[in-house]
Structure formats: C-alpha cells, structure tokens
Image (cartoon, rainbow, N blue to C red):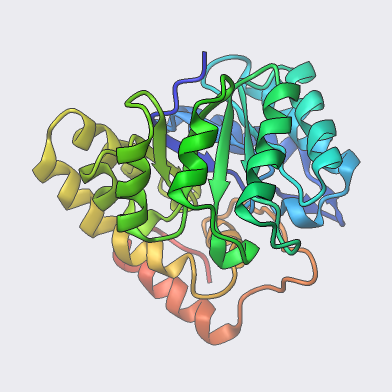
Amino acid sequence: MLKLEGSFVALVTPFKDGRVNREKLKELVEFHLANGTDGIVPCGTTGESATLSLEEHKEVVEVVVEAVDGRVPVLAGAGSNNTKEAEELITHACRCGADGVLIITPYYNKPTQEGLFRHFALLNQVSEVPIVMYNVPGRTAVNMSPDTVARLSKLDKIVGIKEASKDLTQVSEILTKCEPDFAVVSGDDAVTLPMLAIGGKGVISVVANIAPQETADMVRHYLRGEIKEALVLHRRLFPLSQAMFLETNPAPVKAALNLLGKDVGEVRLPLVDISGPNRLKLRQVMIEFGFEVSE
C-alpha cells in the first residue's frame, strides 16, 4: 500500500547524446536512497514527461522501478491530456511494479470540472495501484476545484493529490471536504511547510533533487511535532527553492545538478538551458547554501 507521506523527489530525467542516460538514472536513485528521500517520482513535470516519447517514458519508469527494488515507493508519472494514452501509461506502470501513479490534470484541452471528474473516474477503473492526482494550474491552464477533488476522493483507487496551486485557501477546502485519510502533498517547495501546518502530509519536491536530506528532514521534523527544527530548515531551503524557478522547471534544477558534478545533461526543446545571468544567480544561491560548485 502506498503511503503518501514525507519527501518524494520529482526526479529529473538525465540525457546523454539525445537519449535517456540509464546509468545516470540509476546513480540518481542511489543518491536519493542514501540521503533520506521517502519516495521516487519518475516522469513528472521535472522529469520532462512532455518531451519523452511513449517508449522513453516507459523506459524511465522501468529503470527506476528496477533500481529502487522495493526500498521506497515509486510513484510513476502516468498522466496525459489524452485519456487513452494515460490508460496505457497506467497499465504499463502497474505491470512493471510501480507502487502508485501520479496523474496530472489534462493540459491544453481545458476540460470542465465534469470532464476532469470523468477523466479521473475512468482511470480509477483502469488502475491496479493507488492514484495520486496532480493539480498545477500554472502549467495546465485548468484548476481542479475542491468540490471535484472531494467527489474523486470517494473513489477506491484515488488516495491523494499533489496540489501546486499555491493557494492555501484551496488546500484548506480540500482538506475540509475530503476524508481524513485522503493525503494532500505540496507541489511547490516554497509552501511545503505552510501546507504541512494546515494538514498536508509532505511534498513531491523539485529542490530535493539537489538537497534531498534537508528536504526530507524538514518534513520529518514537522510531522514529529518538531516545529522549530522544521522552520529552521524551511528558511534554509527557501532561497534554494525559489532559485529552482528562476526559469521554467526543470532547466534550473538540471543546471544545479550539473554544477554539482552530477552530469544529467541538457533539457529538451522547446525548453533551453538557463541564461548566463540566471546561472550566476543560481550558482551564488548554491554557494550560500553551502554547496561546492564547479565553474
């Protein structure tokens, strides 16, 4: 059973010579397992799912599931703006051993709330593993309302939501309208601690790609009632979290990993590597955090 709690990393997809770098992907998994990450999320927004071919998407999930080998949960990105394609990705994730699937609201189509409900309700019938919904209106042009989330939370496979609206009032409504065992996690590192304070269970994190231990420790401290310790880590991580969005995600976090010598390669078009001035800003924030970075 998937326990959606703690720090799950929204894992980058490393590339080399235009292809998925399988060996580097395995190295990243081991890095996270050695540094406290509670779960791995391949093929999300940070994993550049939008520019992975269907075959590459499946390859990344397979490599991660095999590399993790049951040591932490794998929540495989399996969303699409094409419900049939999402069905295929869910079926594949179930078949290769993922512990759950992360399903984004359909982007570009701009479905109504009823369309969103029917999309997730159909996928609920398809999936053999728990479903975590993903609401990120800044990238999809659609916001799933708390009432729609509450309707969907009654379905048997839908166990939680990654909420990235940055709207704490909306998060409070979701928590009020859904059952107590329905998990809400942050989809924005900068507001993880405030979301924990109103009842969230954790984060699916971008900044955990480079600061996994600190991110995991912040969430653990809060959930244990160690509020002061959590606040110290929130304030330490906050400038780094903001730097991850100097430009469109995941360009900054890939640049940061490369500055740390992780060699994860480039982002794919239509995204481009971050600009020179923003690279300098990112580098300075990383130095202030305490990282040793390359030139």
* In the image: residue 33, left or right of residue 75: left
Residue ID at (82%, 51%):
52
User: Which percent across, then down, holds residue 213?
Assistant: 36, 39
- Image quarter for residue 11? top right
User: Which percent across, then down, holds residue 153?
Assistant: 49, 31
- Image quarter for residue 216? top left
Residue ID at (60%, 60%):
254
Q: Looking at the picture, does residue 166 appear above or below residue 38?
A: below
Q: Looking at the picture, does residue 171 appear above or below residue 110?
A: above
- Please identify the residue farthest to the front as the structure is shown: 114
* In the image: residue 182, left or right of residue 82: left
User: Which percent across, then down, holds residue 156?
Assistant: 56, 19
- Please identify the residue farthest to the left as the structure is shown: 228
Could you tell me if residue 286 is visible in this image?
A: no
- Image quarter for residue 289? bottom left
Labels in figure, total:
0
Residue ID at (50%, 48%):
209
Q: Looking at the picture, does residue 207 appear above or below residue 250?
A: above
Residue ID at (70%, 59%):
107
Could you tell me if residue 7 is visible in this image?
A: yes
User: Which percent across, then down, holds residue 232?
Assistant: 16, 51
User: Which one is nearer the viewer's eye here, 11 or 136?
Assistant: 136
